Amino acid sequence: MKDLTAKQADLMLFFVAFFWGTGFTVTKVALEIFTATQLLFLRFVIASVVSFILFRKKLKVVTKSDIKAGAIMGVFLAVGYVLQTIGLEGTSAGNSAFLTGTNVVMVPFFYWIVTKIKPGKNNITAAVLMFVGIILLTVDFDNFGKFNIWDFLTFLCAISFAWQVVATGIFASDKDPVVISTLQLFTCTVIFLIMMFFERRPMVLNMQGTASMLYLSLITTMLCFLMQTVGQKYTSTTHAAIILSLEAVIGSILGVLFLNEKYSVVTIFGFAIIFIAVLIAELGFDWLLYRNKKSDF
């Protein structure tokens, strides 16, 4: 696979965030047809099978180190998706997007714990600003105090997802991203297969369920996790977390476009803060200093 520049990797991660941003609504639709366990199993078994077929030649030279990496990434991912999907049964797509997005603040510090590499001030600043922006975009301040068990489970999913981003950043640096991404999907499939043995409700398939399942399996799962693993090979873990957290922003924008929701002053302010956060993450603080210097003339 051809090496990517940091900007190309960031663009790839942006598309991952975009597709993940659409996934909250699609998952809500799918949960009207499937149970959380059925949804997760079907989503990942389809993604795993297609990934194995497409990349079978690369998988012939899998090492024990690759299997270990894929398993660790897969466990964090599976735990995160179980908590997120169950949480979506009792909370809104907007709340889920916001709470999942809080992982952007956790990643720099989790990465610091594991690698002892302190994140740059610009990345920490950008992460905090992104978190504030996500709050402004997705939280209903009139009902802010209503934090139920479903929201708590979703917040726990953010912790697991943060560790998945950290693990991906560590392992993708010196491994084939295609191989460890496929092994990650396979690990999740095994976990969800075990959970299926305890499932009592019969599975029902219809056109709407099939369409939503194929989208979640092939686009937001197989394609996105492959792109995430490839992208994180060529950019920093903290930087990747900031870009991936745009999924909550994109989810909010799609809500405005397709649900006829209107922009408020708070929403516009949130967009502005997030835009500044992305600039700081991409350019550091130099662009601010440069702007101030220009204004002196």
Image: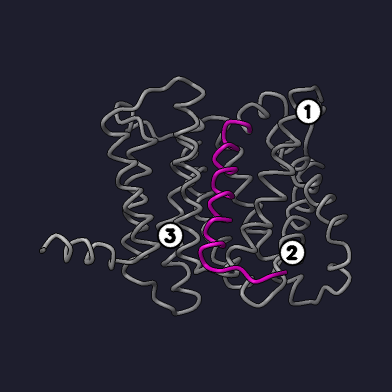
View extreme (left): residue: 296
Residue drawn where x is 23% and y is 66% of the image: 290
Amino acid at the residue labelled 3: Met
The percent coordinates of residue 242 (x first, y second) are 44, 56
Q: Is residue 139 covered in magenta? A: no
Quarter residue 137 falls in: top left
Residue 172 appears in the picture as rendered: yes
For marks 1 and 3, give the CA distance.
36 Å
For marks 1 and 2, give the CA distance.
35 Å
Is the residue under label 2 in contact with that under label 1 (CB below 8 Å)? Answer: no
Q: Closer to the camera: disc 1 or disc 2?
A: 2
Placement of the C terminus among the 4 image quadrants: bottom left
Residue drawn where x is 78% and y is 36% of the image: 199
Q: Nearer the viewer, residue 34 or 22?
A: 22
Quick one: SS at disc 2? helix
Q: Closer to the camera: disc 1 or disc 3?
A: 3
Answer with mark 1 or mark 2, whichever residue precedes in sequence: 2
Numbered label attached to residue 106: 3
Answer with mark 2 or mark 3, whichever residue precedes in sequence: 3
For marks 2 and 3, give the CA distance.
26 Å
Query: What span is colored magenta in the figure?
Result: 1-26
Above or below: residue 264 compared with residue 174: above
The percent coordinates of residue 213 (x first, y second) are 74, 34
Residue drawn where x is 49% and y is 21% of the image: 259
Above or below: residue 67 compared with residue 187: below
Residue marked by disc 2:
178
Amino acid at the residue labelled 1: Arg
Q: Closer to the camera: disc 2 or disc 3?
A: 2
Residue 149 appears in the picture as rendered: no
Q: Is residue 151 left or right of residue 25?
A: left
Residue marked by disc 1:
201
